[in-house]
Image (cartoon, rainbow, N blue to C red):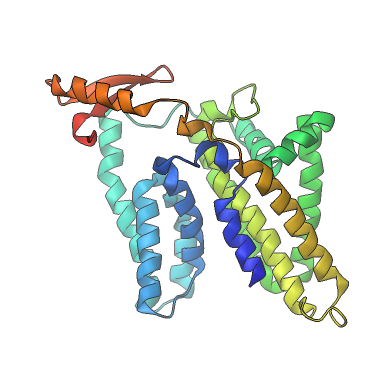
Amino acid sequence: MPLRAVLGAAVVLMPIAVIEIADSTVNAPWYLLLATFWALLWRPRTRMGMAAAALVAFAATSSEIVCVLFAPLVAARLFVLRRPREHAVTAGWLAGCLVQVPAVLSSFHSGQSRVGQLGSLGHSLAFYAHEVVLPAPGWHLAWWLQSFAGKNGATAIVAILLVAAVGAILGTQPSSRPFVVTALLTGFAFCLFETTVNGHVASLPLWKFGQEPGSRYTVLPIFLIQAVVIVGIDYLVRQRGGLRRPGTASLLPAIAVFTLVAVLGGSWVADFRYAAFRSYGARNWGPIAADWQHDCAHSRSGAISERFRNIPQTLPCAHIRS
């Protein structure tokens, strides 16, 4: 149970994610991706649980088209679980996909598609290494490692430690292997797809402390890496007698749990205090919203034009409320 609490805390105190998605409710779907992953692995026994899983899948998929990448998990669920009552979450996921169809077609026809210039595989792989693997234990920790080992050196250090941990889990925990493989491949696929479709994110030559565009694409893969480690340590604790009987239990689980809490907990304390740059907290939104309402009152088209980061945007007046 304590390790489940750590897993839950990882959702709220995600490293890197605080830079782009915390304090910005429009980015809530990136958290829903985490919940959808677990919902697709979950087999709820009650109707309430089934309804919750379906609602989470629908909310995530109808908000972010990238959720179509959960299709392999959905297909595996359909193959393994044959009873219709097991597929409330499948129905929610499919309904969300159907909701996305007219929006995607409309954006393509109107020339407002969010798909940018496609990136290269090399840039996407480098993004995964530097922005997912390196900050997986913590964002500030990643920058501290870079200060004396450089970005590539720091990435190599973290990668070696993660390979050792994942290798130990795969080698000693047969029952954990399906989850480990599924989690790591899912996170890798999401990151690779998102940074290929939005190629400019992965091809930026310089990343600054606190200014890392595209860090929202690291939310799911980093969380799943942490989930793999937490699940592996939980298995170790349960197999070695737990931590309740220090005299009889193995010392290894205690060391593993202590290391996990120390690394993640210490990183979360440092990371979560950092202000998210996408929250635009320095702006006085009252006068800005008042100007928008004034412009809408004189707009003949029912929309106004604004520029965000020097990118022209069209704001429908129907979406602006007092």
Position of the C terminus by quadrant: top left
In the rendered structure, the answer to whether residue 102 lies left or right of residue 260 reads: left
Q: Residue at x 44, y 40 (%)?
A: 24
In this rendering, does residue 15 appear at all? yes
In the rendered structure, the answer to whether residue 319 lies left or right of residue 249 reads: left
Q: Residue at x 40, y 53 (%)?
A: 60
Q: Nearer the viewer, residue 225 or 296?
A: 296
Q: Nearer the viewer, residue 99 or 280?
A: 280
Q: Residue at x 63, y 59 (%)?
A: 227
In this rendering, does residue 137 appear at all? no
Q: Residue at x 34, y 50 (%)?
A: 62
Report how many numbered discs are placed on residues in the image. Answer: 0
| Quadrant of the image occupied by residue 144 | top right
Q: In the displayed image of the protein, which residue is found farthest to the left?
A: 300
- Residue 243, given in percent of the width and then of the height, sits at 77, 76
| Quadrant of the image occupied by residue 218 | top right
Position of the N terminus by quadrant: bottom right
- Residue 175, given in percent of the width and then of the height, sits at 68, 73
Q: Nearer the viewer, residue 179 or 154?
A: 154
- Residue 55, given in percent of the width and then of the height, sits at 35, 62
